Structures are given as structure tokens and as C-alpha cells.
Image (spheres, rainbow, N blue to C red):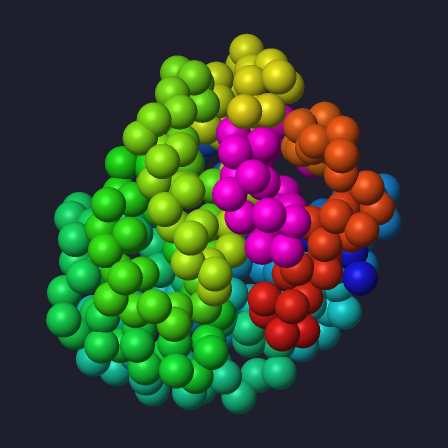
Amino acid sequence: MRIDAHQHYWQIERGDYGWLTPDIPVLNRDFLPPDLKSHLDAHRLDGSIVVQAAPTPEETEFLLSLAATDDSIKGVVGFLDLADASHPVHFERFARHPKFVGFRITIQDMPDARVIVDPAYVEALRSYAVQGIAVDLLVKSDQLEPLIELVKQVPGLHGVIDHIAKPRIAEGAMEPWADQIAELASHANLYCKLSGMVTEADHERWKAEQFIPYVRHVLACFGPDRVMFGSDWPVCLLAAGYDEVVDILERALPDTWGDEEREKLFGLNAKAFYRL
């Protein structure tokens, strides 16, 4: 099974995508399954994992409704606000849907990332960890210290770091990101998505070779069994097309990687992580 482990759909008129404005015209329109089909077909992908793009339970319901009628959607990663005492109610409702595969914590949008190590937050994540629930972690490179502290307090967290934790690729900065990624990778139940990289580079002047040290470092730390390809389409369109995103990753893979490692990266690891 070949899977794009990270992409988005949205419908503007729903009204809960506050970050989508006319100032970003390339994204300020509807993106739905028919728009992605040609890309999936071109790269022989069987389908995708659709990830929340709005911080509302209503958007998760919308994505699950799409999944109910579209075979290309292999799983939905929804939104759950662990600071809201009603999060277990939302989770139980989502979990009734066969294609609900987990939820995402949007740490990047938090004014203070240390909220994730508050006792109530840690307790909630421990509960989900016991159940083996998949948790996407959207985090920026300058927020990794709280994340490291969190995974120490919730050692059973079944988590995946989105977008390789958004290092400062445009600046060519590797540290402290590289050391922190290595520390996170020491937790055997954490995975990492090779996704969302192109939008961390200069949107107009990026070069494919810029991504190689970041990709190689993630692969060296997490190994071939805990990494996933994700296009981050359509957000990637801010800087590159779908084909370019795939090409960037392919060109960055080590020469020693063969068919077995590529099959894991481009689908089998996502299948295992999300228990498809």
C-alpha cells in the first residue's frame, strides 16, 4: 500500500479556516478529493491520510463525512483540544467512525508551548497513550524543548512529529533542531513525517539540495521503520507543486536505500502507525 501520510481538504464556506484569507490566493479556495486524484494516480498512491486544518470539531466531522464516501481517504486525523474538559466526548464521537485514526495537537499555534506539560494535558495524553491512539504533533523547531519534556512524562505516547518539526531551512540552520530531533527519536514509539519541508525554505528560491541534510538527519535518527512521506498538499503549493515535493524527497534519500525502505517510507509505515 502506497500512502500520502499528510494532506488536507477544506471548504472555505464552512467558515472555520481563519488562517485562510484572500492574502494567500493560491490556497483561498476549496480543495476536495477530486482535486488530488490526478496526483495520487501519477505517483501510484492508493490514497492518503487527511489531517485537520481548522481547530474545530466541526471540521473533523466534515472530513469524516468526506471519508465515508471516498475510498482514497484511508484515514482522518482530527482535531482535539485537550484543554477543553469535553475532549473525551468529542473523541468518543469521532472514534465511532471507522476511518478516524487519531488526532492532532497544534502546538505551533499555542502562545506558550509549555501548556503541553501542564498536569491536565499530561494526564489526558497518558490516557490516550494507554489506548494506543495515534497523535500527530504539529510543532515548530523553537518549541521542541517542551515536546521533549512531554514525551518523557508520557513515555507511551504513540506520536508522529509533523513536518520534521519545521526547522529553519531557509536559513540553513541545523542546531539545536538536529540534537533535539535525535533526542526525540530515542523514544522508540515516536515517528516523523517527511512533510511540510518546502514551505520552511525560501518559497521562491529554494534548491533541492537544501533539503538533503535535513532529510538524511531524520532518516539517520528514526531509521527506515519510523518515517513517512507526506505531501502537505495543498499547503505545499505556496512553494512547490506535488511533483516537486515528491522529487525533493526522492533526491534526498540515501543511495543505500532500496525498494524495501522506500515501500516503508511511502506507505507501509503509515499503514502500521495509523493501524489501517
For the point 55% across and 18% down, the residue is: 210
Residue 166 x %, y %: 41, 36
Residue range (magenta)? 214-243
Comparing 153 with 105, the one in front is: 153
**Quadrant (top left, top right, bottom left, bottom right) of the C terminus:** bottom right
Residue 16 x %, y %: 38, 57
Is residue 202 in view? yes
Comparing 49 with 54, the one in front is: 49
Comparing 167 with 260, the one in front is: 260
For the point 16% across and 74% down, the residue is: 120
Instruction: Tell me if 274 is positioned left or right of 48 in this view.
Output: left
Q: Is residue 29 magenta?
A: no
> Is 182 situated above or below 22?
below
**Quadrant (top left, top right, bottom left, bottom right) of the N terminus:** bottom right
For the point 72% across and 74% down, the residue is: 69
Comparing 56 with 13, the one in front is: 56
